[in-house]
Amino acid sequence: MMERSNINIIGEGSSSGGQYGKVKVVGEADFFGSMECEQFKITGEATVDGGLLAEEIKVTGTLQLKKKDAPQHGSAEADIFGHGTAEAAPGIRAETVKITGELTVPGSCEAEEFKLRGQINAGGVLSAEEIDIKLHGVSRVREIGGAHISVKAKTNIPFGDLLQLGMGSLQAALIEGDHIYLENTEAEHVRGIRVEIGPGCRIGSVEYRDSLEVDSRAEVHSQNRV
């Protein structure tokens, strides 16, 4: 098997998409095409025109995935994410994803372990066995699914003011998992085995199997044991 080349960018730089070994950026970088690599480590800012497939993703700063106007069949984007269709939104697949800062993904994010200290905007599904989120700023994810899900608001502002001020909050249509703990989350539906709705939450409906705890500073419109 041919050994993959590495990418190291210090300061400002850019590179084409494709298959690489280790990708390391300290500064700002643009990647023109989907990326497949062993490690993807960013300290600063990075933009990927397509999807990202890696064993390990670690970002301290900002990572943004963008949709190319016309992905071509046979490219990394087509092979990994789009299968040649322009409608496919680029996403992330990795064993571990650790973000300190901001992550923007038009599509979905799939991992075994997902840790975020900051803000996420995902147009698809955030899926991982272990999801640990500490919120800074306003985060939006269409759906979240995992075995263990923890969402906490990391801020000095009182819980009652968080959503009104638009700080340290998460908005989602559906959150589904085995063990779920939420703070300062606004969701239409929450489904789980053991569910704890913490302070600052506004939930439309909760379906649970074993247990449900609702903080006095949270709002849940309907509760159903299934």
Image: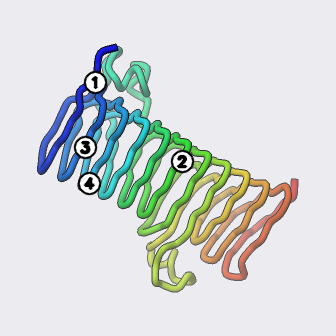
Label 4 sits on residue: 43
Secondary structure state at the residue bearing disc 3: strand
Colour pattern of the rendering: rainbow
| Front in this rendered view, residue 17 or 138 | 17
- Picture layout, residue 76 above or below residue 7: above
Q: Residues within 10 Å of mark 4 (few under 14, many from 20)?
A: some
Whether label 2 touches label 1, CB < 8 Å: no
Secondary structure state at the residue bearing disc 4: strand
Label 4 is placed on what type of residue? Thr
Marks 2 and 3, how far apart at CA: 20 Å
- Give the x, y percent position of residue 41: 31, 46
- Picture layout, residue 12 above or below residue 149: above
The structure residue drawn at horizontal position 49% and vertical position 39%, both measured from the top left corner, is: 95
Describe residue 72's horizontal placement relative to residue 30 as left or right: right
- Give the x, y percent position of residue 7: 21, 35
- Give the x, y percent position of residue 57: 39, 44
Label 3 is placed on what type of residue? Lys
Q: Residues within 10 Å of mark 1 (few under 14, many from 20)?
A: few
Label 1 is placed on what type of residue? Arg
Q: Residues within 10 Å of mark 2 (few under 14, many from 20)?
A: some
